[in-house]
Structure formats: C-alpha cells, structure tokens
Image (spheres, coloured by chain):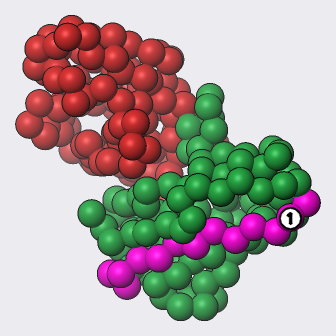
Amino acid sequence: AQTVTQSQPEMSVQEAETVTLSCTYDTSESDYYLFWYKQPPSRQMILVIRQEAYKQQNATENRFSVNFQKAAKSFSLKISDSQLGDAAMYFCAYSGGTYKYIFGTGTRLKVLA
Amino acid sequence: DAGITQSPRHKVTETGTPVTLRCHQTENHRYMYWYRQDPGHGLRLIHYSYGVKDTDKGEVSDGYSVSRSKTEDFLLTLESATSSQTSVYFCAISEGQGAADTQYFGPGTRLTVL
C-alpha cells in the first residue's frame, strides 16, 4: 500500500528567508502524481503545486518549488522569500493507480516577522 | 474557486442522532469525494462518487453512508453519530478520476458530537 510521510510536525522560518518542507512516500507504481496543499487558518485546502512523476523537471510556481527525487521517493517543497501569508498547514499528497489521494499528516509552518 | 459549497459549516450534535452534511458544486464535475481531517492523520477518504447513484467506499467508511441523486449534490450521512466522528469534513471534486486529476476542496464542515 502507498504511504506518505511528513516527518516535520512544525517548522519555523524568518520572514523573507527560505524554508524546505519534507515529504517522502512509498509506492511500487511507476506512474503517479504528487501534490502540495496549503491549509491556512481559514481551513480552505489550496493547491500549491503539483508534480508528474514522469517529468524529471521540478515543478515551480512563483516562490514555491519542489525537489523531486524519484529514486529516493522524496518530494520536498521549498518556499522562497517567505511571507507572513505563507503561515499554514502544508499537506503532501500522492495520487497513483488507485486514483485516490493519500495525504501526509501535515507540517505546520510558522513565519516569524 | 471551484464552485464548491458545504452546509452546514458548523454543527454540534449529540451522540446517537443522525446527521447529514451536504456538498454542492456548480460545475457538473463527475467525481466527488468526502474526507475527514483529524490531527495526526491528515485527510482520509470516507466515500466517493463517480456519477449519479454511483458511489464507493474509501479508507474510513464505517459509520457513514452517502447518496448522490443529482450531479451537483453529494450527501454524507452519519446514521447515529458517535464522539469518534467529531472531525472536520471536506468535500472535494475532480474532473475525472485519473491519478492526474487535481482535486479541489470545499471550505469544510466542523462537526462536534457530544
């Protein structure tokens, strides 16, 4: 069975600095997709970025980028120039052959002014 | 904004009472999902639907039932609520059910069972 692990329950970053959130997963499938979702205090789940496993190029969305290491089954999220509005829970998610999302337990990011 | 609303947004109920949560979408997406979110567990799939009257179980379906009589509405029912069902419930939609299809989430419903 597929699993997704986020080993950092909480992280802190100084405003304007860079922070990396870790995510590892386990799967025997070769074709799958990985996602990072942000959940601010409003509770809304917001898609941050998505990565196709067949693409070697790391996905990027403005200040958000991923480091996708397929062989290591690692999918970390880098947030550059952190802003106060980036403070939230961040969830890593996997979608593969069963077409059902599997979520990690989340990392709470605090941004310090 | 994927046009997803959930009602109610908050509910407090007592053990043993039936509860129905509603998810409504305005964009005729075929696939709809119900998740629950609990500390230390992330989001876990309860049930999903792949069309009108077509539903299937997810990871944590015990104690829940669903119905979908119209494309736009997906109902989650707790027949007899228990304290272990205190949680935040999210509805999600996707264009398809392929692994590539991004899921978009509603605003969530906080349910407290006393």
Secondary element type, mark 1: loop
Residue B34 can be seen, yes or no: yes
Is A7 rendered above or below residue B82? above
Residue at the limit of the structure toward the right, as seen here:
B16
Chain of the residue where label 1 is placed in the rendered structure? B
Provide residue B47's location: percent of width, then percent of height. Answer: 65, 65
Provide residue A57's location: percent of width, then percent of height. Answer: 15, 37
For residue A40, which quarter of the picture? top left
Is B89 rendered above or below residue B6? above
Provide residue B26's location: percent of width, then percent of height. Answer: 35, 81
Q: Which chain is green?
A: B
Q: Is residue A54 magenta?
A: no
Provide residue B14's location: percent of width, then percent of height. Answer: 84, 55
**At 54% across and 31% down in the image, what residue appears?**
A105
For residue B15, which quarter of the picture? bottom right
Q: Residues within 10 Å of mark 1 (few under 14, many from 20)?
A: few
**At 13% across and 40% down in the image, what residue appears?**
A61
Residue A26 can be seen, yes or no: no
**What residue sits right under mark 1 in the picture?**
B17
Is B14 rendered above or below residue B17? above
Query: Chain A appears what colour?
Result: red
Is A65 rendered above or below residue B106? above
Q: Is residue B24 magenta?
A: yes
**At 24% across and 28% down in the image, what residue appears?**
A86
**At 63% across and 68% down in the image, what residue appears?**
B21
Query: On the picture, is A48 further left or further right than A100?
Result: left
Query: On the picture, is B91 further left or further right than B16?
Result: left
A73, A45: nearer the viewer? A45
> Which stretch did the figure color magenta?
B16-28
Quadrant position of the N terminus of chain B in the picture: bottom left
Give the tally of numbered discs: 1
